[in-house]
Image: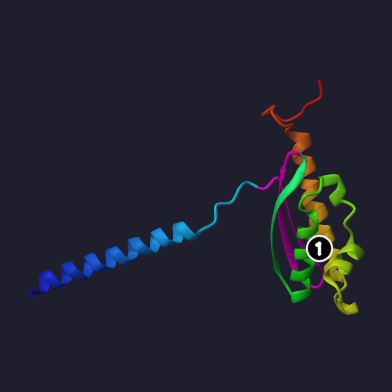
Amino acid sequence: MTLLATFALTVALALAIGLAAVALARRTRPCHRRADGEAAITGTCGDTMTLRLTVHDGRIDGTTFKTKGCAYSFSCLQAAADAAEGRTPLQVLDIDADFITRKVGHIPRDHRHCATLAAQALHSAVDCYMQRQLSCPAGSGEPAGLT
């Protein structure tokens, strides 16, 4: 086999592998809807919690979250996100740090601030949703204004 034929075969093989990798990456990448409310909160401990929620027919029908922190931060944020699903935004405001602590189970005293941080993230995401509703009522397509 000539040097040119070997080179052409190598390039074709590399191109096929690259295209297959791109196709797999696009296929496995989840399709995200635009969040109706979202918040990112960083506590004094350095943990950061990010929570996004979507609302359909007046109820929270989806949440996504991530945290950069300890396992207790993750557990508290997951409990807050799970508790929010199916509730109205106003009902979500009743979820507080004590509720999250009970839902998670045992949290050491020096990590109770994780539940507070999760409640703050949840309430901030709901606040973001409510602010968006005030600035752009459903169906109008335009921000609400004084008339």
Query: What residue sits right under mark 1 in the picture?
Result: 118
On the picture, is 118 further left or further right than 99? left
Q: Position of residue 126 (x, y in %)?
A: 79, 48
On the picture, is 12 further left or further right than 118? left
Q: Is residue 74 above or below residue 38?
A: below
**Which residues are drawn in magenta?**
35-57
- State the image quarter where residue 17 is shown: bottom left
Q: Position of residue 136 (x, y in %)?
A: 72, 33
Q: Position of residue 130 (x, y in %)?
A: 79, 42
At a point 83% along the width and 70% down the height, the residue shown is 104
Q: Position of residue 48 (x, y in %)?
A: 74, 66
At a point 81% along the width and 24% down the height, the residue shown is 146
- State the image quarter where residue 145 is shown: top right
On the picture, is 22 further left or further right than 96? left
Type of secondary structure dominating the magenta stretch: strand
- State the image quarter where residue 69 is shown: bottom right
Q: Residue furthest front?
A: 86
At a point 87% along the width and 51% down the height, the residue shown is 93
Disc 1, SS: helix
Count of labels in the image: 1
State how the image is colored: rainbow
Out of 46 and 13, give the one closest to the viewer. Answer: 13
Specify whether residue 40 is painted magenta: yes
Q: Residue furthest top?
A: 147
Quadrant including the N terminus = bottom left
Q: Is residue 147 above or below residue 96?
A: above
Q: Amino acid at mark 1?
A: Ala
